[in-house]
Amino acid sequence: MDQEDGQTAVDNIVTQFNTYEDFLDSQITTVDLYYLEDEALARQLVELGYRGTGEVVKREDFEARKAAIEIARLAERTQKK
């Protein structure tokens, strides 16, 4: 997977979830919560890449792309006016 494909995947994740925690929660299963008994620990395991079913995205990358998309959206809205 090249840089552009990776960036597109992050963009899809960022637009799909409102917060980074929502993204992490989407990868936690009920079985994970049953055995771990701690949602924060389950989130940490997903964030570190030890658990989860999808792309590993760091918090900094998620928040940076979220901010960039919001800036682009505001710029587009300003141009339309």
Image (cartoon, grey):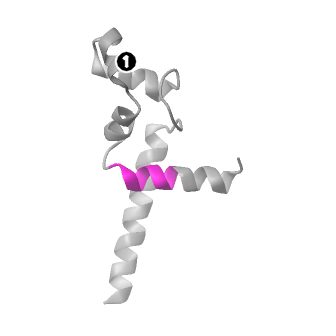
Q: Position of residue 8 (x, y in %)?
A: 56, 56
**Is 77 included in the stretch rendered in magenta?**
no
Q: Most prominent secondary structure in the magenta stretch? A: helix
State the residue at coordinates (28%, 12%): 37
Quadrant hosting residue 34: top left
Q: Is residue 21 above or below residue 18?
A: above
- Of the pair 68 and 47, the residue shown nearer to us: 47
- Image quarter (top left, top right, bottom left or bottom right) of the C terminus: bottom left
Q: Amino acid at mark 1?
A: Asp
In the figure, is residue 60 to the left or right of 9?
Answer: left
Q: Position of residue 30 (x, y in %)?
A: 32, 22
State the residue at coordinates (38%, 34%): 24
Report which residue position mark 1 lands on. Answer: 32
- Of the pair 64 and 48, the residue shown nearer to us: 48
- Of the pair 59 and 22, the residue shown nearer to us: 22
The span picked out in magenta is 10-17
State the residue at coordinates (51%, 36%): 54
Q: Is residue 56 above or below residue 76?
A: above
- Of the pair 30 and 46, the residue shown nearer to us: 30
Residue furthest to the front: 31
Crowding at dot 1, Cα within 10 Å, few <14 / some 14-19 / many 20+, comes out as some
Q: Is residue 8 above or below residue 31?
A: below
